[in-house]
Image (spheres, helix red, strand yellow):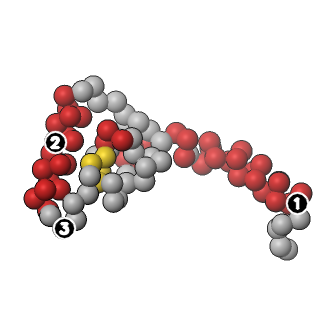
């Protein structure tokens, strides 16, 4: 899913399979695992709403390694300074 989004695809996913941090609300639909017909209907409705609106790609830029590298570096530096890293 993330690779497709990073390539410019617009996601459509049930809540049970989508990470809320990555997939925007308007691209997720309510899960109905116990009722496949209902889930298909909700998915189709959500897709129709996406098609009626202006489809915009939503690449997960905040989750790229290049974006997270600084955060991880700061976290590790804080842990080292606090003496919480076990050698």
Image mark for residue 34: 3
Instruction: Tell me whether the residue at label 2 lies in contact with that at label 3, contact meaning CB atoms closer than 8 angstroms.
Output: no
Figure check: 11 above or below 38: above
Figure check: 9 above or below 75: above
Q: Is residue 55 left or right of residue 42?
A: right
Q: Secondary structure at mark 1?
A: helix
Q: Nearer the viewer, mark 1 or mark 3?
A: 3
Figure check: 37 above or below 58: below
Residue designated by label 1: 82
Mark 1 or mark 2: whose residue is earlier in sequence: 2
Q: Is residue 6 left or right of residue 43?
A: right
Task: Look at 20% across and 40% down and name the residue there.
Answer: 47
Q: Quadrant of residue 24?
A: top left
In percent of width and height, residue 40 lies at 14, 54
- Whether residue 67 appears in this view of the structure is yes
Mark 2 or mark 3: whose residue is earlier in sequence: 3
Task: Look at 82% across and 68% down and name the residue there.
Answer: 85
Is residue 65 or residue 48 the one in the foreground?
48
Residue designated by label 2: 45
C-alpha span from label 1 to label 2: 51 Å
Task: Look at 27% across and 48% down and name the residue there.
Answer: 29
Instruction: Tell me whether the residue at label 1 lies in contact with that at label 2, contact meaning CB atoms closer than 8 angstroms.
Output: no
Circle 1 residues within 10 Å: few <14, some 14–19, many ≥20 = few
Figure check: 69 above or below 87: above
Is residue 10 or residue 14 the one in the foreground?
14
C-alpha span from label 1 to label 3: 49 Å
Q: Is residue 49 left or right of residue 13?
A: left
Q: Secondary structure at mark 2?
A: helix
Instruction: Tell me whether the residue at label 1 lies in contact with that at label 3, contact meaning CB atoms closer than 8 angstroms.
Output: no
């Amino acid at each position: 899913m993330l690779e497709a989004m990073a390539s410019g695809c617009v996601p459509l996913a049930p809540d049970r399979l989508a990470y809320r941090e990555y997939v925007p609300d308007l691209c997720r639909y309510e899960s109905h695992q116990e009722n496949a017909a209902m889930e298909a209907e909700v998915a189709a409705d959500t897709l129709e709403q996406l098609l009626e609106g202006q489809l915009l790609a939503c690449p997960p830029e905040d989750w790229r390694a290049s974006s997270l590298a600084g955060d991880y570096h700061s976290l590790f530096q804080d842990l080292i300074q606090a003496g919480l890293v076990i050698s």
